Image: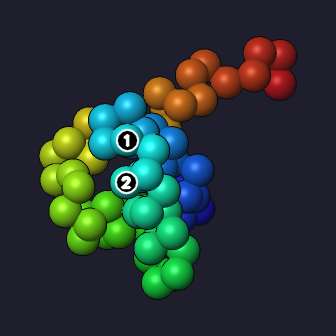
Amino acid sequence: MLDRSLLLVTMLCPGIGYDKAAAIAHKANDEGWTLKPAALKSGFIDANRFDEIVDPVKMIGSGVRGS
């Protein structure tokens, strides 16, 4: 399910900017796509850079301690 989460688009903001990242999220949502195909089709980012930036483990860190 994580690959379907549009929340991951926030990781793209520093690299491509908020407006472009938001456009990608909207396109993915409107078309029923996951984030990666929408990002690649946008032309704002290539597959290698996407994979470098969008890493869910980096986003959540070590998780919630004690859970």
Q: Residues within 10 Å of mark 2 (few under 14, many from 20)?
A: some
> Residue placed at 41% from the left, 63% from the top?
24
Q: Secondary structure at mark 2?
A: helix
Kind of residue at disc 1: Gly
Give above or below for 66 relative to 35.
above
> Residue placed at 20% from the left, 42% from the top?
49
Give above or below for 62 relative to 14.
above
- Residue 39, disc: none
Give above or below for 45 relative to 38.
above
Q: Secondary structure at mark 1?
A: loop
Residue 31 percent location from the top left of the image: 47, 84
Are the residues tagged 1 and 2 within 8 Å (C-beta)? yes
Residue 10 percent location from the top left of the image: 51, 42
Residue 50 percent location from the top left of the image: 27, 47
> Residue placed at 67% from the left, 24% from the top?
63
Residue 16 percent location from the top left of the image: 31, 42
Residue situated furthest front in the rendering: 19
Q: Quickly name the residue at label 2.
A: 20
Q: Quickly name the residue at label 1.
A: 17
* Residue 42 visible in rendering: yes
Give above or below for 1 relative to 57.
below
> Residue placed at 16% from the left, 53% from the top?
46
Kind of residue at disc 2: Lys
